[in-house]
Amino acid sequence: MKFVPIIDIQNGITSFGLPEKDGMSARIKNPVLHFRYWVDKGADRVFFKDKDGAIIGKPQHTNFLEYLDSTTNAHLYYCGGIRDLRSVRIFEHRKYTKIVSATSLVENKKFLRNILMNNIGPIALWIDSLDGFVHTRGARYSVGKRTVDFLRSLPESGIDEIFYCGWSQQGPLEHPDFDTLENFLDMEIPALYVAGNVTTKDDIEQLLQYQELTGIALSKPLYDGTLSISEVSEMFRVQNVKL
């Protein structure tokens, strides 16, 4: 199972400092340094969430992609503002970069068809689900599609990975909805990651029992001390050795 750290980028810097105890690390908010930090910790894939791009409607922080491609073999997921072919082509020849779309792939079937017709892909999809329905734009708007039905439509779509985040009316769930996840994992769907919704070691331990689950993507709990990186890394290491 894959452990995928999420780096949130807003106003050109990361939303959190590096997850270390000393004050200096807490002030380091350079996205490239964060990427290198996670690679040095053993991550073979890292998720960049471009919050500025999501608001503006086109990617805003792609200037460092060439550097990352030339210095590492780790894979980078990039999400935020990818809503047309012009944005997609920014990533077309990036050896280790994979685009993740959310709003546009859910709302605009023509966008996905254009991607496939231009031989771009495979691609990943981020899904926000609230009350059993797919939502977009930070779970603010329902698209009127039941999440379970939408997932069933994906196996032949050209989407090969899904990052799934469950929501309540108050915001992202603090813990996974295990009953819902078990239902999804019984279906024929693309590779599934739980994105967020994890705040305790117990959450991780329970998720690691699902061999059909591809991975867990984590953000804030790694940076604010809620979860210990060394403990999380060891849990994944032991589980993957067993597999």
Image (cartoon, rainbow, N blue to C red):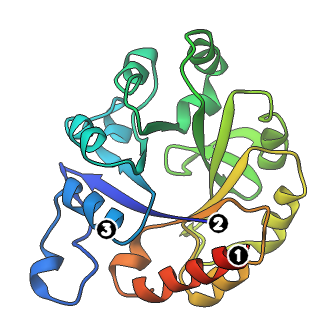
Q: CA distance from mark 3 to mark 1?
A: 24 Å
Please indicate whether residue 83 sits to the left or right of residue 21 in the image.
right
The quarter holding residue 109 reads top right
Please indicate whether residue 4 sits to the left or right of residue 129 in the image.
left
- In the image, 80 versus 146, the foreground residue is 80
* Residue at left offset 27%, top offset 44%: 68
Identify the secondary structure beneath mark 3.
helix
* CB contact under 8 Å: marks 3 and 1: no
The quarter holding residue 118 reads top right
- In the image, 211 versus 173, the foreground residue is 211
Label disc, if present, on residue 1 of the rendered structure = 2
Residue 191 lies, with reference to residue 227, above or below; the image says above
Identify the secondary structure beneath mark 1.
helix
Please indicate whether residue 86 sits to the left or right of residue 145 in the image.
left
Q: Residues within 10 Å of mark 3 (few under 14, many from 20)?
A: few
Q: Residues within 10 Å of mark 2 (few under 14, many from 20)?
A: some
* Residue at left offset 84%, top offset 71%: 179
Query: Which one is closest to the eye, mark 2 or mark 1?
Result: 2
Label disc, if present, on residue 40 of the rendered structure = 3
- In the image, 56 versus 163, the foreground residue is 163
Q: CA distance from mark 2 to mark 1?
A: 10 Å
* CB contact under 8 Å: marks 2 and 1: yes
What type is the residue that disc 1 sits on? Leu
Residue 158 lies, with reference to residue 169, above or below; the image says above
The quarter holding residue 123 reads top right
Query: Which one is closest to the eye, mark 3 or mark 1?
Result: 3
Q: Earlier in the sequence, mark 3 or mark 2?
A: 2
